Amino acid sequence: MANPKRRQSKARQRLRQGANRWRAPVLKTCPECGTSVPGHVACPSCGYYKGRQVLTVTAEE
């Protein structure tokens, strides 16, 4: 098997490991009802996606 010829510096190691850090999910606001929704997902509260209704949502009481 191949072995590394030189030791990697701390800067290069941290550059690689920085890609694995946790990032908070980006939430968008629904233009119909204003709730926070992840991108590319139909709104669970009103059922709209890209300006048209794709889900039928029943009113919960």
Image (tube, rainbow, N blue to C red):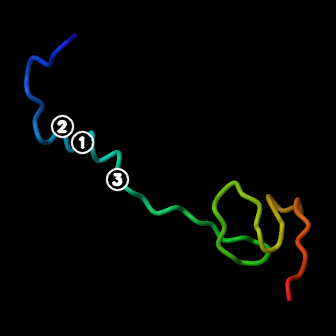
Q: Any mark on residue 21, and which?
A: 3
Q: Which callout, 2 or 3, points to the residue nearer the camera?
A: 3
Q: Is residue 52 left or right of residue 11?
A: right
Which image quarter: residue 37? Answer: bottom right
| Nearest to the observer: residue 33 or residue 17 | 17
Question: Which comes before the other along the chain, label 2 or label 3?
Answer: 2
Identify the residue position indicated by label 1 in the image.
Answer: 15
Q: Is residue 47 left or right of residue 25?
A: right
Q: Any mark on residue 12, and which?
A: 2
Q: Residues within 10 Å of mark 1 (few under 14, many from 20)?
A: few
Residue in the image at 65% along x and 72% along y: 36
Q: Secondary structure at mark 2?
A: helix
User: Looking at the picture, how far across and down is residue 11, in whole percent?
Assistant: 14, 42
Evaluate if marks 2 and 1 touch, with contact meaning CB atoms under 8 Å apart.
Answer: yes
Evaluate if marks 2 and 3 touch, with contact meaning CB atoms under 8 Å apart.
Answer: no
Q: Give amino acid for label 1.
A: Leu
Residue in the image at 77% along x and 68% along y: 44
Q: Is residue 29 left or right of residue 45?
A: left
User: Looking at the picture, how far across and down is residue 46, in whole percent?
Assistant: 82, 73
Q: Give amino acid for label 2.
A: Arg
C-alpha span from label 2 to label 3: 15 Å
User: Looking at the picture, how far across and down is residue 25, in whole percent?
Assistant: 52, 61
Quadrant of the image containing the C terminus: bottom right
User: Looking at the picture, how far across and down is residue 53, in whole percent?
Assistant: 89, 63
Q: Residues within 10 Å of mark 3 (few under 14, many from 20)?
A: few
Residue sitting at the far top: 1
| Nearest to the observer: residue 12 or residue 59 | 59
Q: Is residue 31 left or right of residue 22?
A: right
Q: Which callout, 3 or 1, points to the residue nearer the camera?
A: 3
- Figure check: 17 above or below 5: below
